[in-house]
Image: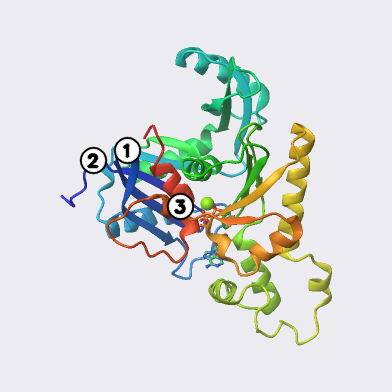
Amino acid sequence: MFGLRSNLRVGLDIGSHSIKLAAVEKMGPRFRLVKWKCQELYTGGDRYDPEGPKKSVAVPGLMRMFNELQIMPKRIKRLASCIGGQLVSAKEISSVMQTEAEMASSLLLEARKHIPLDGSETVVDYQIMGDDVTDSDKVRVLLVATTRRNYETHQDFLREIELKPGIIDIEPLACLNSYIIHSQMPDEGVAIFLNIGARRTTLSVYGRRDSFFTRDLPIGGQAFTEELMHKYGISYEEAERVKREQGMEPDLERKGGNGESSLSLAEKSTFDRLGDEINRSLRFYVKETGQSVFTHFVLTGGGVLLPGLDTYLNNKFNLPIELYNPFNQLDSRVPIEAENPYQMAAAIGLAIRGDL
Ligand SMILES: Nc1ncnc2c1ncn2[C@@H]1O[C@H](COP(=O)(O)OP(=O)(O)OP(=O)(O)O)[C@@H](O)[C@H]1O
Ligand SMILES: [Mg+2]
């Protein structure tokens, strides 16, 4: 039924603004895109929920998406999905290579030392990132942890529509995996990855030689929408439209007349707040690692298409900016027409995971 073959690899990214799904088939060393969709969660006048979608929003959204794609959730055998946000922590360490069982037990203990979580029960996992070029006996291991509650809530969403939770990754790693599988990383220095979602921007730093670092910045596309709603007294839907079409300096009259209100003069723009947050994280990274050679920015996430964003970042940090289109590395029988391909980076990264 529905012609779904079980060798499909499905990547699913449930964001606070939209749900993204990519289904691929492995064809030798490459992947062929079979189906994909990006679906907004709040289109029917419901209010955007910065906490992330409630079950009552996420579950019908997921069901609609699977129906439209004509995929039966319970027939999917290879599923990878992701979680993100403040409740997720990651830390890279260097460790001697061990068997899988040894690795699991010793690293899980290690993780408790390195990963600051609020003391509630945690779920810990790890991923080998490659050889440690500074010590040939060791490998780079990324420890990740989240609260059990966060993990189980995510699994609950999936089970509710009869999806069998498979691999669960963290969002920054899903975006990074999507990029590094086919793109060359420079030998020296590190690249800065920004995944600009709705409620947050996830900044990650990665290079061949230096530690992976990731941090959530509490400013994403929604903060830009809210700035427009405030300044111009327009609704969420209107502000979303204006933002995409005109950016942050639209041809609209400001709320309260022509003069700038004292409030908006005193407030920093969302661009500047985001820029400051990025700056602070990079300074922290330099202090922790001693590495200060940043090669370029790689941008993913729905917010990347905000008019003026790339110019702002380029002016502030004076680094090249790459908008990463994850579809470019996939084969497809039909031309891929995506309005905002950058939004699909995590879902595609999940679908093409080597071990899925
Ligand atoms: N063409 C566009 N121009 C500007 N902004 C856009 C455009 N398309 C989408 N966005 C913005 O991108 C954001 C959604 O991106 P994305 O789907 O990556 O977020 P999400 O994964 O749902 O959120 P999060 O990960 O923060 O929970 C929204 O704020 C939306 O307004
Ligand atoms: Mg997201």
Q: Position of residue 245 (x, y in %)?
A: 56, 76
Q: Are marks 3 and 2 in contact (CB under 8 Å)?
A: no
Give the residue at x 71% y 82%.
Answer: 254
Which badge, 3 or 1, is on the more N-terminal residue? 1
Location of residue 127 with respect to 284 vertically, above or below:
above
Question: Is residue 237 shown left or right of residue 202?
Answer: left
Q: Is mark 3 within 8 Å of ligand 1?
A: no
Q: Position of residue 215 (x, y in %)?
A: 66, 42
- The residue carrying pointer 2 sits among few (fewer than 14), some (14 to 19) or many (20 or more) residues within 10 Å by Cα, namely few
Q: Which structural element holds mark 3?
A: helix
Measured as percent of width and height from the top left, residue 260 is found at: 80, 80
Sequence order check, earlier mark of 3 and 2: 2
- Amino acid type of disc 3? Pro
Q: Quadrant of the C terminus?
A: top left
Q: CA distance from mark 3 to mark 2?
A: 23 Å
Q: Nearer the viewer, residue 208 or 115?
A: 208
Residue 113 picture location, percent across and down: 67, 21
Q: Which residue is mark 1?
A: 78
Which residue, given by chain and number where applicable, does mark 2 sit on?
6
Type of amino acid at the residue the image marks with label 2: Ser
Instruction: Give the mark nearest the N terminus, 2 or 1.
Output: 2
Question: Which one is in front, 35 or 228?
Answer: 35
User: Which residue is painted at 41% across and 35% down in the image?
Assistant: 167
Q: Which residue is mark 3?
A: 326
| Amino acid beneath label 1 | Arg
User: Answer yes or no: do the residues labelled 3 and 1 have beta carbons within 8 Å?
Assistant: no
How far is disc 3 from disc 1 in space, using C-alphas?
Answer: 20 Å
Labels 2 and 1 touching (C-beta < 8 A) = yes
Residue extending furthest toward the left:
1
- Mark 3 neighbour class, 10 Å CA radius: few under 14, some 14 to 19, many 20 or more: many
